[in-house]
Amino acid sequence: MTNVSKRILTALAAATLPFTSSVSALTIVNWNSNETSSAGNYTLPTAVAGDFGLGDPQVNDTRNFRTFNLGGSATVTTGTSSTWYHGYDYIQADRTGNVNNATRTLGPELNLRFQYDSAGQSGVAFFLQMWKKQNFVNLAAAPAVIFDSDSSFSMTRSRTERNQVRWVVLNGSTFYISQSVGATLNDPNSESWAIYNPSNAAFGLDFTGDANDFTERVFDDVQAVGFLVYTLDAGNKVVSGRAWATINNVSISAVPIPEPASLALLGLGGLLILGGRKRDVR
């Protein structure tokens, strides 16, 4: 190889390194205690009364919800992963007015509390939060984002009272939710996922599939990532008593894939190597 070819190939490699599939997984979400909000609590919308299927036929349940919409308004604060989208659905049986003690305090952590003011009351709560590709920390400008064996999801929680966490991915135009529960998920392609359809219907953030709906997926066009927190006690999503989740930080990693122009440049570099070798032989 000639010295000129070496210099050109080195320059091409340096220019295309951020977009090659050989790059190690990079952090795309880094949400932590640096995230603060001058607004403090998320605002509860007006309560809706009705019968929301919590065990009795009377129209005396209360529901507070915010529609989840990746195309809608975002929550923007200060910090590394400062732009995200969220929706929630809090339903309490036998109550009028706002759901009691349903708080979503932000800064320096996400504090989700759902409880009742008298014994025997029950309810269910779902909270979905996601980050879009355009706001990913390192790969917002990547032509496409995928998961590989080094990709991972993780969070730390200081409260886990009557609640559970599942991870959510938007791949292309389809949402998926993980079968795996808990604060950590490694190698997303080897895990099982089910199609997930968050909506503004009652229990619209719930997932309704059974075990047969979960299977391994290939994530080749990651558009958004996040998590669902929901009430759970002894296998039941409808709980009696306080449910409380405090999330201190969230970290998610993924990798980019090469854009056609980068592949073309790498191909040109290979041709330069071959050309240099042929000239050296002669």
Image (cartoon, helix red, strand yellow):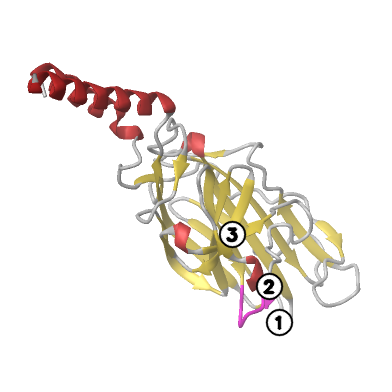
Residue type indicated by callout 2: Tyr
Q: For the residues marked 3 and 1, what is the alpha-carbon distance in whole angstroms?
A: 33 Å
Q: In this view, does 264 lie to the left or right of 192?
A: left
Q: Is the N terminus in the top left, top right, bottom left or bottom right quadrant? A: top left
Q: Which of 77 and 145 is in front in this view?
A: 145
* Residue 19 sits in quarter: top left
Q: Is mark 2 on a helix, strand or loop?
A: loop
Residue under the image location 63 percent in, 80 percent down: 235
> Which residue, as the protein is rendered here, is positioned at the far right?
58
Q: Does residue 170 belong to the magenta stretch?
A: no
- The crowding category of the residue bearing disc 3, from other C-alpha atoms within 10 Å (few below 14, some 14 to 19, many at least 20), is many
Mark 2 in CB contact with mark 1 (< 8 angstroms): yes
Q: What element carries label 1?
A: loop
Instruction: Work out whether mark 3 precedes mark 2 in sequence or the reverse, and give the earlier one.
Output: 2
Query: Magenta residues, as a range?
Result: 232-239
Residue type indicated by callout 1: Ala
Mark 3 in CB contact with mark 2 (< 8 angstroms): no
* Residue 223 sits in quarter: top right
Q: Which of 101 and 268 is in front in this view?
A: 268
Task: Where is residue 174? Give x, y as percent.
Answer: 64, 48
Residue under pointer 3? 177
Instruction: Work out whether mark 3 precedes mark 1 in sequence or the reverse, and give the earlier one.
Output: 1
Q: Is residue 65 above or below residue 121?
A: above
Residue under pointer 2? 116
Residue under pointer 1? 119
Q: Is the C terminus in the top left, top right, bottom left or bottom right quadrant? A: top left
Residue type indicated by callout 3: Ile
Name the dominant secondary structure of the magenta segment.
Answer: loop
Task: Where is residue 51? Give x, y as percent.
Answer: 87, 67
Q: For the residues marked 3 and 2, what is the alpha-carbon distance in whole angstroms?
A: 29 Å
